[in-house]
């Protein structure tokens, strides 16, 4: 197996490669045709608005895993370090700042890199590294910026007045986009985009639930399919792709075909994957073990109401971080306990992520709940979702090997 590359088994990966290529090609085409390109934070209602107004979105945060997968992250880290930023900051920040300030000028970049922004949207409500990334981008690129100071509220505490405030910010954003593009906003097109996202999320939930089947039809090694949930919400592309994956998975289930021939252990993964080393998910296969559920993949789905398009995108923007990474411990425990039961988990792997403090906080409490309430063993390892220098394969193997042997013994194998 090629270093760092995961062994994937779903045929849908061929279509996914085309979608990835097309996504970046679309933004370059927009730039070449003189249509404005906007850089935005991920997982918020801006994407439906952008697609409803034919604007090509660019997500620096989503570009970071691509850089990690292709290996350009190291150079971007160097560019950031040269400017005096600490190596302890989140790898997304270090990659994206280095890329925007210097890497973007390199020639022959994979996927042609990112087109420079014509405008920036800095919406607040995110974690500090994301907000700081946009602060650096806003200082660096001499382009119009729309800032909104959205509050960061735990999902379960969001009230109507938070939503109404976010709706008001969305209306400001619409006026800004109308001025930038010279186009009139059409609420029916937004309604359609919201409907596509809602359908994509419904399909995503159904797809993920299929992994509760024994043997599991696909593993975390296939997490790249999440690309459509980040970049193609609001479009039919995500809906059609997910329908195709679901059909393939249903056919596998009907044939009784699992990821591996003799599934013995079912694992849960907490925290962001190591984007530069996705083959780690195949490592468990030597013990006939499969990662069948994760906190991260579950976080990208949110049902939306096409009859309330503005409220829907406002709410999605408010929960963009409380849902994905800055999840309250209360909510995380609720999600994990539910998943452990639904996916019939034998053991949990917790990635203590140097880069992402918001997700890594509370992992000891999670281990306690797993052990005391569910009698599910867990193991924690130190790593980093973007920086391979902060991950030791030898330490990982030592810890995981012992853990897997214990799990097999517990199940009398
Ligand atoms: S949520 Fe975590 S991974 Fe994402 S930008 Fe913030 S610190 Fe980094």
Image (cartoon, rainbow, N blue to C red):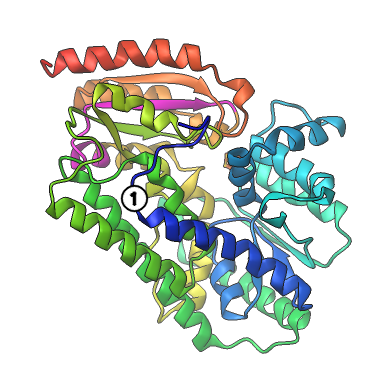
Q: Is residue 343 above or below residue 233?
A: above
Residue 300 shows in this picture: no
Expressed as whole percent of the image width and height from the top left, the position of residue 183 reads 70, 87
Q: Is residue 169 above or below residue 403?
A: below
- Indicate the quadrant containing the N terminus: top left, top right, bottom left or bottom right: top left
Q: Quadrant of ligand 1?
A: top right
Q: Which residue is mark 1?
A: 10
Quadrant of res 172: bottom right
Q: Residue at x 74, y 81 (%)?
A: 181
Residue 184 shows in this picture: yes
The number of numbered badges drawn on the structure is 1
Q: Is residue 397 left or right of residue 162?
A: left
Q: Is residue 348 above or below residue 55?
A: above
Q: Is residue 247 left or right of residue 387?
A: left
Q: Residue at x 53, y 37 (%)?
A: 275
Q: Residue at x 58, y 60 (%)?
A: 21
Q: Along the line of sight, which residue is nearer the eye, 15 or 337? A: 15
Q: Residue at x 33, y 26 (%)?
A: 284
Expressed as whole percent of the image width and height from the top left, the position of residue 412 reads 10, 15
Expressed as whole percent of the image width and height from the top left, the position of residue 254 reads 13, 54
**Mark 1 sits near ligand 1, with its Cβ under 8 Å away:** no
Q: Along the line of sight, which residue is nearer the eye, 97 or 356? A: 97
Quadrant of res 69: top right
Residues packed near mark 1 inside 10 Å, few (<14), some (14 to 19) or many (20 plus): some
Residues in magenta, as a range: 338-354
Q: Is residue 338 left or right of residue 119?
A: left
């Amino acid at each position: 197996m090629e270093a760092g590359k995961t062994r994937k088994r779903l045929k849908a990966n061929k279509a996914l490669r085309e979608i990835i290529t097309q996504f970046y090609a679309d933004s370059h085409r927009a730039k070449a045709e003189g249509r404005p390109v906007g850089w935005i934070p991920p997982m918020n209602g801006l994407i439906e608005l952008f697609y409803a107004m034919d604007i090509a979105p660019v997500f620096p945060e989503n570009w970071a895993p691509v850089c990690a997968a292709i290996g350009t992250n190291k150079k971007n880290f160097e560019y950031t370090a040269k400017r005096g930023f600490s190596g302890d900051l989140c790898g997304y920040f270090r990659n994206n700042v280095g890329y925007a300030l210097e890497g973007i000028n390199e020639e022959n970049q994979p996927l042609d890199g990112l087109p420079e922004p014509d405008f920036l949207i800095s919406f607040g409500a995110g974690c500090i590294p994301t907000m700081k990334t946009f602060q650096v981008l806003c200082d660096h690129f001499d382009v119009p910026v729309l800032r909104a100071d959205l509050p960061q509220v735990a999902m379960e505490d969001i009230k109507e007045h938070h939503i109404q405030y976010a709706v008001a910010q969305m209306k400001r954003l619409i006026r800004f986009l109308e001025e930038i593009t010279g186009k009139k906003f059409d609420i029916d097109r937004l309604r359609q985009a919201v409907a596509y996202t809602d359908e994509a999320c419904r399909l995503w939930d159904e797809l993920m639930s299929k992994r509760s089947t024994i043997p599991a039809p696909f593993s975390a090694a296939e997490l790249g399919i999440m690309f459509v949930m980040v970049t193609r919400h609001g479009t039919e592309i995500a809906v059609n792709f997910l329908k195709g994956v679901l059909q393939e998975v249903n056919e596998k289930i009907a044939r009784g075909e699992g990821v591996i021939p003799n599934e013995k252990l079912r694992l849960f993964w907490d925290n962001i994957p190591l984007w530069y080393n996705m083959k780690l998910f195949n490592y468990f296969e030597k013990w006939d073990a499969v990662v069948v559920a994760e906190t991260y993949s579950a976080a990208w789905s949110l049902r939306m109401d096409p009859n309330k398009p503005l409220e829907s995108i406002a709410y999605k923007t408010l929960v963009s971080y409380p849902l994905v990474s800055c999840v309250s411990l209360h909510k995380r425990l609720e999600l994990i306990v539910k998943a452990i039961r639904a996916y019939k988990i034998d053991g949990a792997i917790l990635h203590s992520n140097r880069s992402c403090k918001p997700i890594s906080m509370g992992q000891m409490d999670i281990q306690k709940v797993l052990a005391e309430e569910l009698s599910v063993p867990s193991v924690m390892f130190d790593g980093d979702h973007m920086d391979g220098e902060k991950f030791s394969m030898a330490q990982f193997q030592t810890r995981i090997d012992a853990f897997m042997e214990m799990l097999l013994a517990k199940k009398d194998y």
